[in-house]
Amino acid sequence: MKALQKTISPVDGSVFAERPLAGPAEIDAALNRARAGQRDWAHLPLETRAQLLHRAVDHLVDNGDAIAAEITWQMGRPISQAPGEIKGLEERARYMIDIAGEALQPYRPAPKPGFERYIERRPLGLVAVLAPWDYPYLTAVNAIIPALMAGNAVVLKHAAQTPLAAERFAAAFAYAGLPEGVFDFLHLDHGLAERLVADTRVDFVSFTGSVGGGRRVQAALRGRFIDATLELGGKDPAYVRADADLPQAVAGLVDGTFFNSGQSCCGIERIYVQRPLYRDFVQAFCEQTRRYRLGDPTAPDTTLGPVVNTRAADFVREQIRAAQAAGAEALIDERLFAASAAGTPYLAPQVLINVDHSMELMTAESFGPVIGIQAVASDDEAVALMNDSDFGLTASVWSADLAAARAIGERIDSGTFFMNRCDYLDPALAWSGMKNSGRGCSLSAWGYQALTRPKSYHLQI
């Protein structure tokens, strides 16, 4: 009998989905189908691939309400917010489809008499995508759509918390009429996922997840001459200068901190505020935080759902406890959030002051509804603290001074730098990280480079 993968819903602790785990034989069959299907897929005109993939996106959008409900039950995001994931998927997918013609266009150097010379971008072959649960569609689409548009086949392994996302992608591509084997998915345990990554039929790996998971992917690829994109999380900082628009900064940073219960690799995890604005910022931030409604995420008036499981909630609770023991002050009374309870994934949002970098709360990824806010005297102090991190995914500055913001951005160690916004992926811009936030690039025209290889043509006429 095959082992079962069980998805425990954080909504009520019930088993929401059970799926048999694939074994070595299923991996072997899927990879063989993918290798066979990819050859014909790569020879289809780009316009044909685009039409098929737009049709698949249509199918996902048409089923958006059902998908949103599944997201809520699988990982706990409030139903009032879950539909936004499909809107974001559509934006990214259609953009990447539409720019493929330009991104994959052959490069031609300056003419040389007697020769025709150009460089084509050719598909790699088979791309393995390992996707996480926090944004199950938005993270996966970053790799799946451009990989397919570039002429690759894709095998998807989704997180055990969100297996229905993989099945929804498969249904959409089947509806669109993709040839057999061009897209497939496998429900795998960690050991067999590493076996998938290490298989010589795989030509590229796209992984989104933890730093530890990224290290396991790296280890599985040891000795193989293929690349991988690794997006591994962050401890993303925000800096509020004294000249910032206070209501704008508060609204943007409260949402950037607590949306999806703080479970976002590019969510705001630490805030630095210039002293003249510090007191007013903290007061306004707490006032807005207290307006959240924590509870059953299937209820339409809930604005803050549970974190993914009790273990994740307890990790955040321990960060808060340790920070308080070291002198931090918690400003939010948990009794305002009746659903918050020890031993459950329901966790009240929390704001702490009197924090510093001796506390894990300000240096280690929290991935939950908590924030530390620290006063700073100058841009230089803010930059030093923002860069004092093992991570480098995104960073934001809130200011009315564009020149000052640009100057700060040039000094910040991050893959993306924002001014007066945060926690957003623009598909026209490269998505990348530094330090322990990973390596490689997705989205934008640059994202196609990793999913293709150059082939040069040197033709004497």
Image: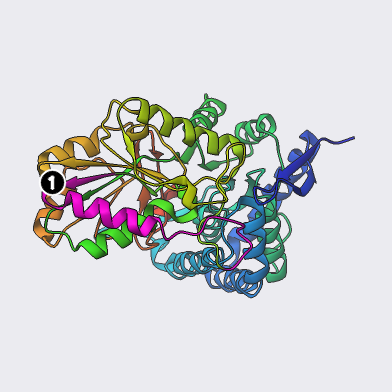
Which image quadrant: the N terminus? Answer: top right
Question: Relative to 415, does residue 189 appear above or below in the rendering?
Answer: above
Question: Relative to 459, does residue 227 appear above or below in the rendering?
Answer: above
Query: What residue is shown at x 57% (from left), y 72% (from top)?
Result: 54
Q: Position of residue 113 (x, y in %)?
A: 25, 60
Of 447 and 367, nearer the camera is 367
Determine whether the residue tagged by mark 1 lies in a helix, strand or loop.
helix
Residue 78 within the segment the image draws in magenta = no
Q: Position of residue 254 (x, y in %)?
A: 35, 56
* Residue furthest to the front: 335
Residue 458 visible here: no
Query: What residue is shown at x 25% (from left), y 35% (from top)?
Result: 354
Q: Position of residue 452 (x, y in %)?
A: 47, 50
Q: Which residues are magenta?
A: 271-300
Of 95 and 109, nearer the camera is 95
Q: Position of residue 318 (x, y in %)?
A: 47, 30
Residue that badge 1 annotates: 275
Q: Quadrant of residue 71?
A: bottom right
Question: Relative to 201, does residue 273 appear above or below in the rendering?
Answer: below
Which image quadrant: the C terminus? Answer: bottom left
